[in-house]
Image: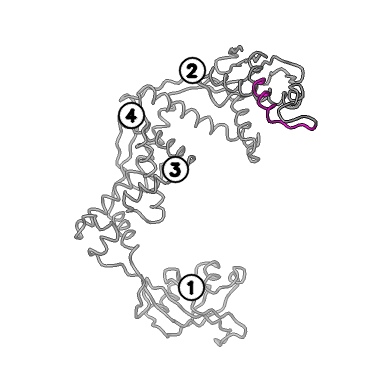
């Protein structure tokens, strides 16, 4: 057995591994002896088949299997013992000499490897990175309050149509003389929100109407586009686009969405029975705190983008692109969508991600940052919280989040994903503590515009 590494350049090398007959033959003979005890061949009793016959039947496949095991074992051991920091995985060398397993007894295997470039990063107070604090406005507090309270409101009947009313009405198409049009459009109990009626004259005709009232509307004037007309009248958009008729509208039902009262029942529903909120002042304080927490998450996300850019600008690194493209194609050989053309377009983004990964590794090693199971669980809980928030559930109890997160982490792929996110959070957290923050107050609109530049 002989194994060695030949450097091609600073980033590429070849590992050569020689497997000799003496390395695999004892194991092959042992397996053949065991196989001989079990094999059945016509004309021979079980266990009495000549060794030469068994070897002819199984010798070559057993040898190939053992040689492959030796190659994998010794290649991995060599990489580990020599502490080789590789990009991707070893690939069969493009200059691999032909191996004839039928006639050869000693084999030389060559593997191309890519050496990770050395990356050194300085993270200190000498680095100043912007941190944007989004200014809380009365409008934002009002929107946050409406978001929380509105989840527990309900629609109630009202006497007359108002600006916020939702109607159920019957639409009957009229002819040019104002009579019911023969074979015209008739739509019963269609739902109309007064907020989508844009024409002032048509809206004025509806305002103040009561259940049972009849009035005449022109659909084209009342509603802004053919999509809305088609939905309300339950017709095709093409028909709606050329519709000019008036309609007799009969009001069947009028409702409006009513928010619940600010009382203990609402507080408990919104934040849980143990929330400690018992009056309007405490409710408003919780609304404000939740809003600040949400905005802080957005500020942290923006800081992450700016911090990555600032730190990555410190590093000028070259990659073995040719090898990495080969490795990506080889490791995704079953992905028909990853063609060489697609790979070429995606390579810059991949190299940026790889560069950040190397920077992370350097920061982690240089500063002895440790990833604990608690960090992974915390990140999984944060991810779960964000998922629930997408469905309007912003106050899920921690105990429920923890259970959900633990269940998610039982899946290997999810655990790997959460661990990757937790590492990123720890590195960004370290950077935030290590650098000088250039804190800036900023409006929501100004903050949103920051993302237009990226």
Query: Local crowd at mark 3 within 10 Å, few (<14), some, or many (≥20)?
Result: few
Query: Local crowd at mark 4 within 10 Å, few (<14), some, or many (≥20)?
Result: some
- The residue beneath circle 3 is 410
Q: Which residue appears at 42% of the width and 28% of the height?
A: 360
Query: Local crowd at mark 2 within 10 Å, few (<14), some, or many (≥20)?
Result: few
Query: Local crowd at mark 1 within 10 Å, few (<14), some, or many (≥20)?
Result: some
- The residue beneath circle 1 is 222
Q: CA distance from mark 1 to mark 3?
A: 55 Å
Return the disc, 2 or 1, that comes first in the chain's sequence.
2
- The residue beneath circle 2 is 83
Disc 1 + disc 4, Cβ < 8 Å: no
Q: Which residue appears at 77% of the width and 29% of the height?
A: 44
Query: Mark 2 against mark 1, which lies toward the viewer?
Result: 2
- The residue beneath circle 4 is 128
Q: Quadrant of the N terminus?
A: top right
Identify which residue, 451 or 285, lies in the foreground.
285
| Secondary-structure class at tag 4 | strand
Q: Which residue appears at 68% of the width and 16% of the height?
A: 107
Identify which residue, 96 or 424, lies in the foreground.
96
Q: CA distance from mark 2 to mark 1?
A: 74 Å
Magenta stretch: residue 30 in it? yes
Return the disc, 1 or 4, that comes first in the chain's sequence.
4
In the image, residue 278 sits, relative to residue 371, either above or below, namely below
| Secondary-structure class at tag 2 | loop
In the image, residue 64 sits, relative to residue 22, either above or below, namely below
Identify which residue, 9 or 296, lies in the foreground.
9
């Amino acid at each position: 057995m002989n194994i060695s590494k030949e450097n091609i350049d600073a980033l590429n090398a070849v590992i050569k591994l020689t497997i000799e007959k003496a390395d695999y033959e004892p194991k092959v003979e042992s397996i053949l002896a065991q196989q001989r005890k079990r094999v059945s061949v016509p004309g021979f009793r079980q266990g009495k088949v000549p060794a030469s016959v068994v070897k002819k039947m199984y010798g070559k496949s057993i040898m190939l299997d053992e040689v492959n095991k030796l190659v994998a074992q010794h290649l991995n051991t060599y990489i580990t013992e020599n502490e080789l920091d590789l990009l991707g995985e070893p690939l069969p060398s493009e200059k691999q000499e032909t191996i004839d397993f039928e006639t050869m007894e000693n084999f030389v295997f060559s593997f191309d490897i890519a050496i990770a470039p050395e990356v050194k990063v300085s993270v200190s107070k000498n680095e100043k990175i912007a941190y944007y604090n989004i200014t809380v406005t009365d409008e934002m507090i009002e929107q946050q309050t409406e978001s929380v309270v509105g989840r527990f409101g309900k629609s109630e009947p009202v006497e007359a149509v108002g600006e916020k009313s939702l109607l159920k009405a019957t639409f009957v198409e009229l002819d040019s003389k104002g009579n019911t049009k023969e074979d015209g459009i008739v739509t019963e109990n269609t739902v109309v929100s007064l907020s989508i009626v844009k024409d002032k004259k048509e809206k004025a005709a509806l305002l103040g109407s009561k259940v049972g009232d009849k009035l005449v509307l022109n659909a084209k004037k009342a509603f802004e586009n053919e999509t809305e007309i088609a939905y309300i009248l339950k017709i095709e958009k093409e028909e709606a686009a050329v519709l000019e008729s008036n309609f007799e509208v009969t009001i069947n039902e009028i409702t409006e969405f009513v928010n619940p009262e600010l009382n203990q029942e609402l507080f408990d529903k919104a934040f849980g029975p143990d929330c400690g909120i018992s009056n309007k002042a405490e409710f408003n304080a919780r609304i404000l705190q939740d809003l600040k927490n949400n905005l802080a998450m957005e500020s942290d996300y923006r800081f992450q983008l700016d911090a990555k850019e600032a730190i990555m600008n410190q590093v000028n690194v070259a990659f073995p692109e040719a090898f990495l493209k080969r490795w990506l194609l080889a490791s995704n050989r079953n992905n028909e969508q990853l063609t060489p053309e697609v790979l070429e377009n995606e390579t810059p983004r991949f190299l940026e991600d790889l560069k950040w990964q190397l920077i992370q590794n350097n920061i982690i090693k240089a500063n002895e940052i440790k990833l604990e199971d608690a960090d992974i669980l915390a990140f999984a809980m944060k991810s779960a919280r964000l998922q629930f928030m997408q469905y309007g559930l912003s106050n899920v109890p921690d105990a429920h989040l923890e259970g959900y997160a633990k269940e998610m982490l039982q899946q290997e792929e999810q655990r790997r994903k959460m661990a990757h996110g937790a590492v990123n959070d720890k590195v960004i957290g370290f950077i935030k503590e290590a650098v000088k923050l250039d804190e800036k107050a900023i409006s929501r609109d100004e903050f949103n515009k920051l993302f237009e530049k990226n």
